[in-house]
Amino acid sequence: MSAERISVSQFLSLRSGGKGINTSDVLTYLYLTVGTILMFGPVLWLFASSFKTQAGLLKYPPPLLPYQQVQVEVEGYDDPLPLFNVTMEDGSARELAQARRVGIEAQMVDPADPGAERIKVNISQREPVEEVKLAWENYLDPLIEIDYFDFITYLKNSVLVTTVATAITLVINSMAAFALSKYRFKGRDAIFVLFISTLMIPITVILVPVFLVITSIGWKNNLWGVIIPGAATPTGIFLLRQYMLTIPDELLDAARIDGGSEWHIYWRIILPLARPALAVLAIFSVMWRWNDFLWPLIVLSQNDYFTLQVGLNAFQGELQIQWHYVLAMTVVTLLPITLVFAFLQRFITTGIATTGMK
């Protein structure tokens, strides 16, 4: 019997104790609210901060919304002047534009009467006039204006590395899991334990040996040097093996009786039945490969081979980091991961929940 669909409002109005609200309901909604804030709060803060200017990011305390100082056109000045609320000596307040600043003294002009004499005030007597304004240039400049950030090239490299590496990971891990789950041979369990034990080895321990191997075969500054290492993951083998253990051996025996080869069994029976687990592994692999920074940074030193994550390092200088560009491009790099997750999320619960069940 299929479950009855309910709306979001009906779901939020559900009560465990009938119509009244009891302590369990309060604690449940409190827990869910705090969990939602902890999960999505940083993402929303990142998205809001990506529309702030460099100066807006340095404000303390940091505002949630992207405020920018109002600029006004003043007759006799080529560029717009910043607008301030100035507290005069008699206690009155006026909106004046700053024409010049020398130390702690600012020279202000009245936008309505630019020909009048400049008013000299202490910078402590003024507050900037701000408005909520989105800094779209944070997104447009890296994509169009900035020459040292080749977004299209970095995007193509990231897509190529992620797609090819994920495909290779699924093939190699599924073959290994098929052998370790459906074939009985001496030392099978020992090999599986050996695979899992590699999870205890920190990645920093093997960086130098793997880099020497990659260099010796000529894959330095080559995307294959980023793709091949780590193609077989112990986590993927474990996940797929535990799921394939739930597939009845009778199906394989029936296929062998019908004359099916081992490759036919793997390709036509095992892979279709293990599709939920493969989808989960694909999500993990895409997230890992797309967000990988350390290994591509080590292998790649030519700008033409950079992935997006390594390319973001171009905004980091010796004396200053252009955080407004970094945050904006980080939001852009999150979009493909979000789309992949949205497309495959229906397999996650099924794949994880049924892994290891007999």
Image: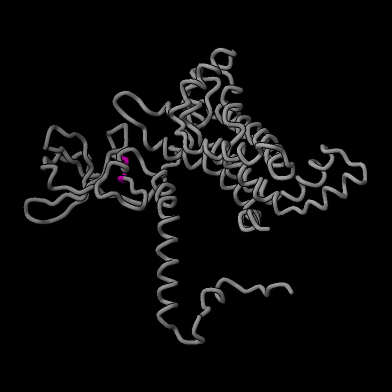
Secondary structure predominantly adopted by residues drawn in magenta? strand
- In this image, 297 relative to 124: left or right? right
Question: Residue furthest toward the front?
Answer: 186
- In this image, 36 relative to 255: left or right? left
Label count reads: 0
- The residue lying at 61 percent from left, 23 percent from top is 224
Point out residue 32 in the picture as x, y percentages from the top left corner: 45, 66
Which image quarter holds the C terminus? bottom right
Which image quarter holds the N terminus? bottom right
Q: Say whether residue 71 is magenta.
A: yes
Point out residue 139 in the picture as x, y percentages from the top left corner: 47, 38
Residue 333 vertical placement versus 251 (above, below): above
Point out residue 128 in the picture as x, y percentages from the top left corner: 24, 47
- In this image, 68 relative to 328: left or right? left
- The residue lying at 18 percent from left, 41 percent from top is 108
Q: Nearer the viewer, residue 154 or 5?
A: 5
Task: Identify the coloring.
Answer: one colour
Question: Residue furthest toward the left?
Answer: 90
- The residue lying at 45 percent from left, 41 percent from top is 136
Q: Which residues are magenta?
A: 69-73
Q: Quadrant of residue 116?
A: top left
Residue 194 vertical placement versus 297 (above, below): below
Point out residue 186 in the picture as x, y percentages from the top left corner: 69, 37
- The residue lying at 56 percent from left, 47 percent from top is 338
Q: Say whether residue 192 is magenta.
A: no
